[in-house]
């Protein structure tokens, strides 16, 4: 074991020291009990994917905690309704656990549909529901018929796998939504006949701090229109129309790759995986999207647009690059695709990635990560505070990129931090995002506080 | 009294969290302790995330990461392995094992599993404290006291009487716990303060970071509690069944005094009176001056305060303390609410003298949600919100300012340092309430009056 750390034996296979040991990295497994994994659960995976659908009611069928901790969990913005920012829970109590929660759930759906007339209802199952055996399918089917709206069960029982399973459950729920007869409204068929193929869906962007709007604006610049945003700032109606697009672009492949596959099978929609994190990937993605349309005009526009934007951004990044050159970065993020983009972005800023980890990365993500990082970079799957602390120290990281739970750890270790998670309030995607990222890293890494914490009275 | 919630079958925007969250906070206040949640991975991650945002401290809580297999065939193997790994990684002297909804529903026999584990691994030098905290059973408020009580139940035994006093603290901020310790120092009394998260959840920056931060109630102190002179339990709302002080009283005959969080004039008076009684010492001089300054402040702001119509929400204990402070200052607590189930809030507040002399009777409601609170806030024409951060959603929609108080305050910096206890802290709290109200009044009154009389 080259990584040389006193962690648990069972964890050793999940850690590699790049290009020094050539073992395959173990990943995509259940978390090790007692290791203090940073992962959430199946339900959480499903909820974060579906929650940004703005006009849906999201009912968490379970005890209160699950709903409480995920109320308004994503900082996704809406251009219209705000229904999604409420947390609905059946708030199961002891009696419901003993006698079953189906009746309460049915009554809950009735109550909310009668009162609020939502466009659709998603019903999430949680751990307990999986055990007491409530028949979500049946309850939802009956409610659907009764109210004439989509009431879609999301099979997200918490213990049945990890967060990635929740992504799958969410993708399945989205497919159901598309499969309703509404998908063949006149609107959609008209759209489907557009020959140029410049109508697309964006999958896997959740409109954190308005990111999907930024991407949409870019696409408009080159003559591409978005049929359906999935799921950032989306509506039920909009998602139903998705099959009418010419192709899908998938931003967060970890969560939405599966939907892309399903839509391809069912509706014949091709997809490409893209990323708008960092200048390099943004440019590449724009060009690839343009190529997909086979429309010379669009391609030309894309070339012009990206060239212009990249040079403006390049100019803005210049001053940060000087301040960041040679810094050492640790990153612990959710999905593998994001990690890959981040590495490129870091390198573009002349920052050295020394520790890269993900919660739910797949083998191919790790292959890419290995490819892109230097010898000696530590790569870790489903890590925990002990390992992160150890590697941050031994790898002499100057800052950590991560989420809320990782932030205090970075600070206690006396290094900078960049928040790359749900709750941030500024966009990190596209050209402006690249500048924001550099600015944030600079603000943290080059803050005067680090000098003072090394002083004594 | 109207329904407790607008929706009968739905909790819309919860004003509560689940029991294991409370247990996690309690265990952070014990020296060299770690907590493992027996259940699926998600619960512990959520709780860590929530706590990390409030305390701005790394919060490590382990999970037995139950999977499908463990759920169907029982989670003993997961739990034992989880404990083993926690010991290897953290080397704690005490491990709290709190159950989640899942573990409770599949009917895990935790006590037995732990007994087996201790035997198999030959681990007599470590303590394992199982706490039953089904998320569906109650809220973080009860979970907290339940855990404190279990810790005491597990670690105490009949012992020689000693001169110390026990202080049981509720879910207040680390800074407030430090304040209480300061007060005890003034009394020059030996004490056992349980749980003590004043250092562990607000650790000073140090170059040598330790995964289990130093501090917390020590074993010897907890053990000594059984022979203490008295217990002062800073909670009037905790039910007898989960009250640690009641346990010490029932089991070891340690006399029990219960008081509210020392926030507000009367609550501070009571707290000091009780301390004087149990220690046999006069109230230290320092407090006379601080009290006098608070009185001065109360006079300064009383007329403004009479214009405030407050809605108070959060855990029963903090809601009670704030309500009492509002009442004594002529702030109308138009809505007094909590997501926990309790009849005590109502009965205790009814005893409050000012309640008889109000223009309007406050609405007191328990087991409620924010959907209901928001509607009542509108109906009752509330102009100031007092409670934890989730109230921000009312501010955002209806523009009513929120004074952040209670748990969690997770959208602002420095929540671990909020200090509203004592006469000085209460004065600061009171000023903050008044000024938050004034800020809104002064920025809007010109337009309001113009609209009313001149447009
Ligand atoms: S309510 Fe139950 S299942 Fe949900 S987070 Fe709390 S303990 Fe876990």
Image: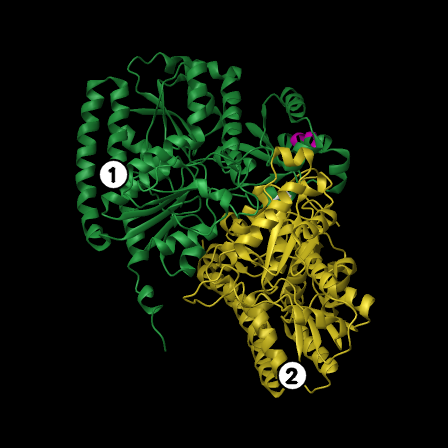
> Where is residue B442 shown, x and y percent of the image?
46, 64
Q: Chain of mark 2?
A: B
The part of the image, by quadrant, that contains residue A201 is top left
**Along the viewing direction, whichever of A54 and A41 lies nearer the viewer:** A41
Residue A108 colored magenta? yes
Residue A400 colored magenta? no
> Where is residue A36 shown, x and y percent of the image?
53, 48
State if disc 1 and disc 2 touch (CB < 8 Å).
no
Chain A drawn colour: green
Image disc number at residue A279: 1
For the stretch drawn in magenta, what is the main secondary structure?
helix
Asked whether the residues under marks 2 and 1 belong to the same chain, the reply is no
**Left or right: where A37 falls relative to A443:** right
Q: Is residue B227 in view from this perspective? A: yes
The stretch of residues the image draws in magenta is A106-110
> For mark 2, what is the residue?
B187
Q: Compared with residue A346, is residue A186 higher up or lower down, i.e. above or below?
A: above
Q: Compared with residue B340, is residue A56 higher up or lower down, i.e. above or below?
A: above
Residue neighbourhood size for the residue with mark 2, other residues' Cα within 10 Å, grouped as few (<14), some (14–19), many (≥20)? some
- Ligand 1 sits in which quadrant? top right
Chain B drawn colour: yellow
Image disc number at residue B284: none
> Where is residue A76 shown, x and y percent of the image?
44, 40
Q: Residue at x 21, y 42 (%)?
A: A313
């Amino acid at each position: 074991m080259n990584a040389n750390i006193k962690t648990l034996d069972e964890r050793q296979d999940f850690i590699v020291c790049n290009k020094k040991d050539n073992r395959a990295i173990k990943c995509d497994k259940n978390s090790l009990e007692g290791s203090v994994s940073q992962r959430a659960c199946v339900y959480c995976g499903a909820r974060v994917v579906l929650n940004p659908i703005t006009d849906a009611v999201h009912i968490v069928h379970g005890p209160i905690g699950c709903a409480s901790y995920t109320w308004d969990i994503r900082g996704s913005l809406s251009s219209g309704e705000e229904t999604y920012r409420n947390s609905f829970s059946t708030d199961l109590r002891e009696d419901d656990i003993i006698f079953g929660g189906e009746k309460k759930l049915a009554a809950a759906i009735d109550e909310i549909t009668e009162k609020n007339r939502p466009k659709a209802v998603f019903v999430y199952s949680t751990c307990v529901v999986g055990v007491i055996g409530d028949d979500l399918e049946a309850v939802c089917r009956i409610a659907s018929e009764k109210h004439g709206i989509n009431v879609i069960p999301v099979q997200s029982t918490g213990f049945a796998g990890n967060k990635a399973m929740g992504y799958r459950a969410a993708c399945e729920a989205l497919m159901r939504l598309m499969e309703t007869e509404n998908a063949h409204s006149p609107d959609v068929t008209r759209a489907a006949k557009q020959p140029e193929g410049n109508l697309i869906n964006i999958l896997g962007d959740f409109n954190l701090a308005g990111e999907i709007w930024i991407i949409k604006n870019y696409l408009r610049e080159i003559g591409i229109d978005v049929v359906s945003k999935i799921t950032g700032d989306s509506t039920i109606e909009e998602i139903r129309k998705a099959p009418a697009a010419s192709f899908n672009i998938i931003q967060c492949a970890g969560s939405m790759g599966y939907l892309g596959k399903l839509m391809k099978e069912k509706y014949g929609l091709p997809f490409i995986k893209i990323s708008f994190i960092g200048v390099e990937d943004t440019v590449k993605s724009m060009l690839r999207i343009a190529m997909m349309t086979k429309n010379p005009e669009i391609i030309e526009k894309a070339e012009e647009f990206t060239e212009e934007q990249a040079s403006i951004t390049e100019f803005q990044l210049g001053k940060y690059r000087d301040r960041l050159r040679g810094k050492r970065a640790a990153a612990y993020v959710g999905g593998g695709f994001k990690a890959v983009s981040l590495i490129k972005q870091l390198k573009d800023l002349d920052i050295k990635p020394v520790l890269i980890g993900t919660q739910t990365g797949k083998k191919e993500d790790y292959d890419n990560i290995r490819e892109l990082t230097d010898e000696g970079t530590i790569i870790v799957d489903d890590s925990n505070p002990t390992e992160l602390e150890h590697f941050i120290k031994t790898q002499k990281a100057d800052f950590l990129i991560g989420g809320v739970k990782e932030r205090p750890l970075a600070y206690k270790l006396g290094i900078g931090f960049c928040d790359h998670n749900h709750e941030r309030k500024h966009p990190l995607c596209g050209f402006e995002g690249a500048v924001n990222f550099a600015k944030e890293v600079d603000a943290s890494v080059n803050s005067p506080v680090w000098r003072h914490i090394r002083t004594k009275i | 009294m109207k329904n407790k919630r607008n929706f009968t079958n739905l909790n819309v925007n919860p004003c509560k969290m689940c029991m294991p969250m409370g247990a996690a906070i309690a265990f952070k206040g014990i020296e060299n302790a770690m907590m493992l949640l027996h259940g699926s991975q998600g619960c512990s991650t959520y709780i860590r995330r929530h706590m990390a945002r409030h305390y701005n401290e790394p919060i490590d809580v382990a999970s037995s990461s139950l999977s499908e297999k463990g759920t169907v065939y029982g989670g003993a193997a997961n739990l034992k392995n989880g404990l083993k790994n926690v010991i290897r990684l953290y080397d704690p002297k005490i491990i709290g094992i709190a159950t989640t909804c899942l573990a409770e529903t599949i009917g895990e026999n935790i006590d037995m599993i732990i007994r087996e584990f201790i035997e198999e691994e030959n681990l007599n030098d470590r303590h394992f404290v199982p706490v039953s905290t089904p998320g569906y059973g109650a809220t973080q408020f009860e979970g907290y006291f339940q855990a404190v009580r279990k810790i005491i139940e597990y670690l105490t035994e009949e012992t020689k009487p000693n001169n110390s006093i026990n202080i049981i603290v509720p879910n207040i901020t680390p800074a407030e716990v430090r304040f209480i310790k300061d007060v005890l120092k003034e009394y020059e009394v030996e004490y056992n303060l349980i749980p003590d998260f004043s250092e562990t959840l607000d650790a000073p920056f140090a170059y040598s970071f330790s995964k289990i931060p130093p501090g917390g109630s020590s074993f010897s102190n907890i053990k000594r509690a059984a022979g203490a002179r008295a217990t002062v339990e800073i909670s009037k709302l905790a039910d007898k069944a989960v009250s640690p002080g009641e346990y010490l009283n029932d089991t070891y005959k340690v006399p029990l005094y219960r008081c509210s969080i020392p926030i507000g004039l009367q609550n501070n008076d009571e707290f000091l009176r009780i301390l004087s009684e149990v220690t046999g010492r006069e109230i230290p001089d320092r407090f006379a001056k601080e009290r006098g300054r608070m009185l001065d402040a109360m006079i300064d702001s009383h007329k403004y305060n009479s214009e405030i119509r407050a809605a108070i929400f959060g855990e029963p204990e903090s809601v009670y303390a704030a309500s009492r402070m509002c009442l004594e200052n002529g702030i109308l607590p138009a809505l007094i609410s909590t997501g926990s189930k309790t009849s005590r809030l109502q009965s205790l507040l009814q005893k409050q003298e000012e309640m008889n002399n109000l223009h309007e009777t406050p609405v007191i409601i328990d087991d409620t949600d924010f959907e209901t609170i928001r509607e009542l806030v509108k109906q009752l024409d509330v102009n100031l919100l007092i409670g934890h951060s989730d109230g921000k959603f009312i501010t955002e929609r209806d523009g009513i300012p929120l004074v952040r108080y209670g748990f969690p305050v997770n959208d602002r910096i420095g929540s671990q340092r909020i200090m509203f206890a004592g006469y000085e802290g209460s004065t600061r709290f009171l000023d903050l309430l008044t000024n938050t109200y004034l800020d809104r009044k002064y920025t809007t009154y010109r337009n309001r009056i113009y609209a009313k009389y001149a447009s």
